[in-house]
Image (tube, grey):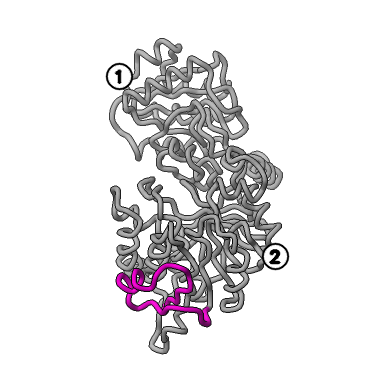
Amino acid sequence: MRTVVTAVGMRDAEQRFFDAHPGVDLMGRAARAVARVAAEVNTAGQVLVVAGRGNNGGDGLFAASILAQHRRVLVWSAFGRTHEAGQAAARAAGCQFVDALGALEALPDCGLVIDAVAGLGSRPGLPQALETFAAACESSAIDVLAVDLPSGLDADSGAEQPSFRATHTVTFAALKPCHVSQPAAGRCGRVHVVDIGVEIDGTQLRQAEEADVAAWWPTPTASSDKYARGVVLFDTGSSRYQGAALLGIAGALHAGTGMVRYAGPVHSGLILTRYPSVVMGDGRAQAAVLGSGWGEDEGASGRVSSARLHAPVAVVDADALYSLPGRIDGWLLTPHAGELARLLGCSRSHVESSPVSCAREVARVTGATVLLKGATQYVAEPGGRVTIAVPGPHWSAQAGSGDVLAGICGALLAAGLPAWQAAVAGASIQAMAAARNPGPYPPDELARRLPDVIAGLVAAD
């Protein structure tokens, strides 16, 4: 699990470090880390360091003084003045200082640009001269190493802003929200988290890794039977959206559930022709999956109540989200941004700009875990902790992917995982399947590829 810390949390951690270690040169540690990563990721051509006024600029300037021992280094002080001690070190090391025009003219001979303009506390966006330069770097396909974050981004937001597009980002102590939240994360490139001695207290935001999913994944033993592996009851689909039932069942079966019961309205022949192992009709189950493909069903609340008679917990998707029976501790809600906005009575744009706080609020009010689906998938628990799923490619943004995901999560919930783990593992394994099978595979095809991904994951663990 990777810790994610806000800008305020990082500043507080740094202050605790300074209080406990007065006189320690933290900037020197950061600069050496930047120089080391720069040397690892690119060794061709000259280096151009773009330095801002604050400590971020100081990190870049001291890194420039180290790199100048082995490479030609140019420095552009983007705001005219910059960190004085860092500037003095760079000049003493032989770095050549240039202006904005000189920086643009030098680009064709550069192998690497180090973006040390703006740090964690900076305002989003770039002045025009820097925006022009950042665009020139991107169009020229020059490697950019960002210090802390690509300048122009908001450290605490996933929103896309006029900014540098980094090939690599080196950050300190822990990830920041912009590194893990799309679309901003797409501008950070590969993020290198460097330990400089600053300790981060436990935060309420973290990102799962493949190793976490491998450790959590339920695997059968010699004593397992179909009931021990988990029984999932589906009430999904409708005459208009019959495919939703098939997609959810595909997710559960290929994720390894012990048994699927189907109690929805889709004709048994359609389901059994595709999945003959499905048992038709109500019955006891460890978890239910509700709502996918219901449409505007006036009997939604009755269908939710009926499912409660057969299963202690449920995955609630799509149209069932609007028929919640009060507090539902232990359940899992799987809305996308539009559905979450309807639950909160706000705009979709508000959810997209504040996904973590919005997911937390619905989890707090309902007592359920909330999996907010999207390019970045957030799992919020009623207590406020949020875990971000393993990311995947954007090919899986297709109709039906959410139906498959509900089925995967239902299988994991039935196998005994708590709702937050079922959500994180389910969203992550779907993303991992898409990453291992790049291209426009439809969701039912990716579901069929889940067993290979799971087998490889468990074997590696």
Q: Which label was assigned to residue 108?
A: 1
**Disc 1 element:** helix
Q: How many marks?
A: 2
Q: Considering depth in this image, is 309 or 428 the residue closer to the camera?
A: 309
Q: Which residue is mark 2?
A: 327
Q: Are marks 1 and 2 in contact (CB under 8 Å)?
A: no
State the residue at coordinates (38%, 15%): 104
Local packing at callout 2 (Cα closer than 10 Å; few below 14, some 14-19, many 20+) is few
- Residue 209 drawn above or below residue 21: below
Which of 118/288 is in front?
A: 288
Camera sees residue 25: no
Local crowd size for mark 1, using a 10 Å CA cut-off: few (<14), some (14–19), many (≥20): few
**Secondary structure state at the residue bearing disc 2:** loop
Quarter of the image with the C terminus is bottom left
Residue 261: in magenta span = yes
Image height of 265 relative to 427, above or below = below
Tell us which disc is closer to us: 1 or 2: 2
Mark 1 or mark 2: name the one nearer the start of the chain: 1
Q: Which residues are magenta?
A: 258-285
Res 439 visible: yes
Which disc, if any, is residue 37? Answer: none
Q: Is residue 284 above or below residue 197?
A: below
Residue 269 vertical placement versus 207 (above, below): below
Separation of marks 1 and 2 at Cα, in angstroms: 61 Å
